Image (spheres, helix red, strand yellow):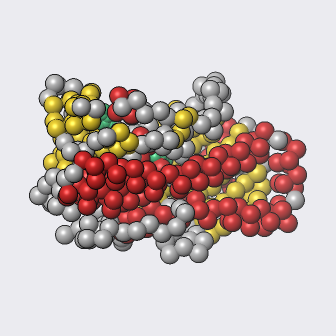
């Protein structure tokens, strides 16, 4: 039984059902898509999709390979580095809804797969200290050999199982905007597939072409800070333009106010459960380790969790012995904790550096003024620091018995 049809739950349900197991995938939400979702897939996540047989990405998944990362301080280009930075695949923006749809469609072709949509799990069923199933909001009880909680960062099942989440200090909050096409067309042309970060006196923001069309812009806020007073029409664009390099500033100022959708404030929560399991229950994905949005890690770690979990769980679930299942739960945690710890530490360091540049006006001025020689030095340091954020701690083992084959 898999609870939650985000990237973790969908990928795991697909892998388990492909190996001939019976899987119920229970999702509280309806079929409506979320407007703001993570879009960035790093080579680490693309590698996981390849191991599942989903590379190249199906045509139906809207996708946009990034061309470069570009950093601007006080209106001055500090450095730009081109994708794929030595990887086989460039970091790729995807429309998460269409990726999940494809994975679910493939799971739907497996005889053991069942999807329960619009059904919120409310309770864990227990017998003799072991989790043996779930209770749904409508009172229905479903028994299972194993419950995998992939119910996201606010996981109810984590709370019900009394598994502690150690919260890290919130690095930032993000105000998300969408700059809608066709008005954002000239901006899209200027971006030319780049992920652009801008830091200046008014704050910092990143903008990039969205795989769903238009441009996505995330403005970083100090945790708990209030955004500037609601601006007059065009006020947001004016605020961004104030910190932007001249050509970008012109394009932002030219945007008609109705093309700017948002903001949506998405609180960021970051943390890690030291223990991911109880007898009969496993936490996976954000439920076990809510990820910061910095450098797009959450979906990638979710897919890698699912792949490793499937490899370790399938033999135990086939054997059907509770002892073997619980030992596999321990093994999944042990296999995934080092990468999650390391990636969260690297995200924390990125957040600290960004914060330093936001707050230290003199340092920012100095770097901007000396960009011609400081830029290449910083680019080299930045690139070296990106290796594990892009690739994870190393290759992950693909499934061993055909779970990884591509869509039929
Ligand atoms: C602002 C922001 C931007 C981000 N951008 C990126 C990015 O660009 N790239 C990236 O890799 N990551 C990004 N992330 C992180 C990424 O979104 C998450 O890490 C990832 O979605 C985690 O996947 P998941 O399947 O574990 O959880 P989720 O995607 O949260 O899915 C959990 C699912 O469980 C369901 N559910 C919850 N409770 C119940 C219940 N009681 N019963 C049944 N179902 C339930 C929910 O409806 C949901 O569908 C971002 C995160 C934030 C906050």
In the image, 265 versus 391, the foreground residue is 391
Residue 190 percent location from the top left of the image: 60, 60
Instruction: Name the residue: 26% across, 66% down.
Output: 403
Q: Is residue 23 left or right of residue 220?
A: left
* 256 in relation to 194, above or below: above
Q: Is residue 65 left or right of residue 281?
A: right
Residue 404 percent location from the top left of the image: 29, 68
Residue 39 visible in rendering: no
Instruction: Name the residue: 67% across, 37% down.
Output: 239
Q: Give the image quadrant in which the ligand numbered 1 is located.
A: top left
Instruction: Name the residue: 82% across, 48% down.
Output: 364
In the image, 158 versus 225, the foreground residue is 158
* 140 in relation to 290, above or below: above
In the image, 98 versus 378, the foreground residue is 378
Kindly give the residue lying farthest to the left in the view shown.
111
Residue 162 visible in rendering: yes
* 282 in relation to 304, above or below: above
Residue 137 percent location from the top left of the image: 21, 26
């Amino acid at each position: 039984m898999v609870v939650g049809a985000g990237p973790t739950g969908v990928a795991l349900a697909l892998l388990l059902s492909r190996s001939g197991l019976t899987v119920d995938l229970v999702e509280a939400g309806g079929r409506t898509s979320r407007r703001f979702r993570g879009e960035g897939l790093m080579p680490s996540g693309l590698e996981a999709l390849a191991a599942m047989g989903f590379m190249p990405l199906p045509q139906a998944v809207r996708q946009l390979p990034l061309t470069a990362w570009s950093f601007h301080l006080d209106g001055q280009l500090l450095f730009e580095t081109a994708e794929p930075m030595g990887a086989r695949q460039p970091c790729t923006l995807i429309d998460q809804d269409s990726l999940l749809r494809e994975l679910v469609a493939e799971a739907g072709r497996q005889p053991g797969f069942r999807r329960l949509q619009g059904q919120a799990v409310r309770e864990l069923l227990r017998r003799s200290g072991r989790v043996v199933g779930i209770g749904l909001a409508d009172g229905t009880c479903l028994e299972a050999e194993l419950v995998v909680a992939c119910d996201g960062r606010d996981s109810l099942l984590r709370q019900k199982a009394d598994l502690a989440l150690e919260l890290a200090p919130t690095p930032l909050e993000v105000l998300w905007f969408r700059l809608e096409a066709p008005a954002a067309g000239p901006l899209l042309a200027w971006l030319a597939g780049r992920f652009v970060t801008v830091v200046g006196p008014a704050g910092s923001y990143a903008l990039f072409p969205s795989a769903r069309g238009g441009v996505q812009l995330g403005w970083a806020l100090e945790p708990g800070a209030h955004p500037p007073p609601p601006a007059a029409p065009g006020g947001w664009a004016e605020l961004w333009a104030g910190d932007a390099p001249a050509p970008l500033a012109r394009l932002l100022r030219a945007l008609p106010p109705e093309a700017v959708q948002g903001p949506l404030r998405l609180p960021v929560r970051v943390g890690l459960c030291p223990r991911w399991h109880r007898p009969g229950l496993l936490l996976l994905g954000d439920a076990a380790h809510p990820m910061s949005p910095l450098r797009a890690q959450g979906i990638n770690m979710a897919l890698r969790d699912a792949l490793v979990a499937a490899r370790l769980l399938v033999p135990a679930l086939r054997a059907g012995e509770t002892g073997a299942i619980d030992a596999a739960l321990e093994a999944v945690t042990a296999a995934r904790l080092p990468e999650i710890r390391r990636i969260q530490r690297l995200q924390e360091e990125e957040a600290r550096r960004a914060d330093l540049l936001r707050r230290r006006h003199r340092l920012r001025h100095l770097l901007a003024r000396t960009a011609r020689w400081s830029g290449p030095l910083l680019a080299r340091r930045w690139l070296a620091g990106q290796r594990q954020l892009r690739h994870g701690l190393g290759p992950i083992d693909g499934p061993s018995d055909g779970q990884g084959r591509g869509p039929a």
